[in-house]
Amino acid sequence: MQFIHQVEPLITEREVAAVTTYLRSGGWLTEFEETKAFEKEIAAFIGVDHAVCVTSGTVGLYLALLAEGVGPGDRVIVPNYTMIATPNAVRWTGADVILVDVDPVTMCLDLDSIPKDHNAKSMCYVEINGRSGRMDTVQSWCAQAGVSLIEDACQAMGSYESGRLYGSFGDCSVFSFTPHKIITTGQGGVVVTNNERVAASVRKLKDFHRVGAGKDDHDGIGYNFKFTDIQASIGRAQLASIQGRIQRKRSIFSHYAEQLSGIPELSFLQTTADTTPWFVDVCMPSRAIRDELVFSMKERGIGVRPWYPPLNHQWPYRSAGSRFPVSEDMAFRGAWLPSSMGITSTQLDYVCSSIKDFINTVDISASSSRVREEIA
Ligand SMILES: Cc1ncc(COP(=O)(O)O)c(C=O)c1O
């Protein structure tokens, strides 16, 4: 059997046809009509007024923060468990990151752990792996505190709450289109918002701060963070099949849940019918067993990936004396199982039986840092 990657993009004939048609159309490759159409379709799908495509989710977060007026001297609340792009985007603006521990049920930012004297201007709330379940509370907390809410929905395309898709709750929200996302354009991202001023500001910032389309006058220092119409043609083809992609992610999760539930050494995070888990995430009893699992699956031709380390254990965000009990415990025990949309039932069965076999035979006491070193 071929190596089963933890995740691979799903590219179909629909995308091949879309790119071919675009390339034959005489378009100039850079962003133009195809990108405008993709932005309209994304906005309609999420249920917001504006969508602005940029070069990545990280850049989207950065421009969203700038558009919300975040800059040097400001403070932004970020969960201690997220991909490092979230706090990096804050740091790019010159603002300081306030790390906050997460809730053990969802691994999302725990509002009760925010320090009373936070003095924050914004919050980057991450619906990690499509979970949250408490956006009303997050919105009211931000409104009461006078903090703007930026949803980092990079992992949450296709997940709902109260009948609304994530990405529609924040003052502005950001999605990523990297190859392991539900929709991918290779690289890329999109900022979505109902606020016309924010959308206009992101548009200006990403296009050299031009005073208007096609004009070579500039009233500020902007960037070149533009999208391309080739990417947009792929994105449009994928968006057309979004419901199938969502269903596929959900059925992969169900397959694992059916076969692996009830094993005491392996636990799933609570997943509601509204959640579209981007990756199938499980928690092991200890870091050593998690590391042994990753190592042992690799030997069997299966890619299992450890969760992100908590941010306060990453060099740029180390802070002496700070403690984040939930993220520091759970992040080191978590693993992502193979979750490609193209994974077959036979492959899923093989992964499940390999995991069961591992759990039945692993010598837990022998799991050691040797394994961690080899994985690194
Ligand atoms: C939660 C989160 N935020 C931000 C990003 C950054 O997105 P990009 O890789 O498109 O810059 C990612 C990417 O995986 C992510 O998972």
Image (cartoon, grey):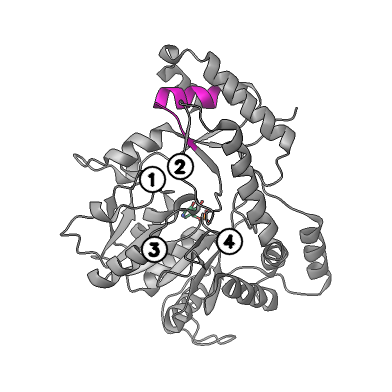
Residue found 39% across the figure and 47% down from its top: 107
Q: Nearer the viewer, residue 67 or 253?
A: 253
Q: The magenta stretch spans which residues?
A: 282-295
Question: Relative to 55, is 366 on the left or the right?
Answer: left
Question: Tag on residue 188?
Answer: 4
Residue found 47% across the figure and 20% down from its top: 371
Residue 10 in the magenta stretch? The answer is no
Q: Quadrant of residue 146?
A: bottom left
- Residue for badge 2: 269
- Residue for badge 3: 135
**169 to 32, vertically: above or below:** above
Q: Quadrant of the N terminus?
A: top right
Q: Badge 4 local density, few (<14 within 10 Å), some, or many (20+)?
A: many
Asked if the residues shown at circle 1 and circle 4 are in contact, with their CB atoms under 8 angstroms apart, the answer is: no
N-terminal of the two: label 4 or label 3? 3
Question: Distance between the Cα atoms at labels 4 and 3?
Answer: 25 Å
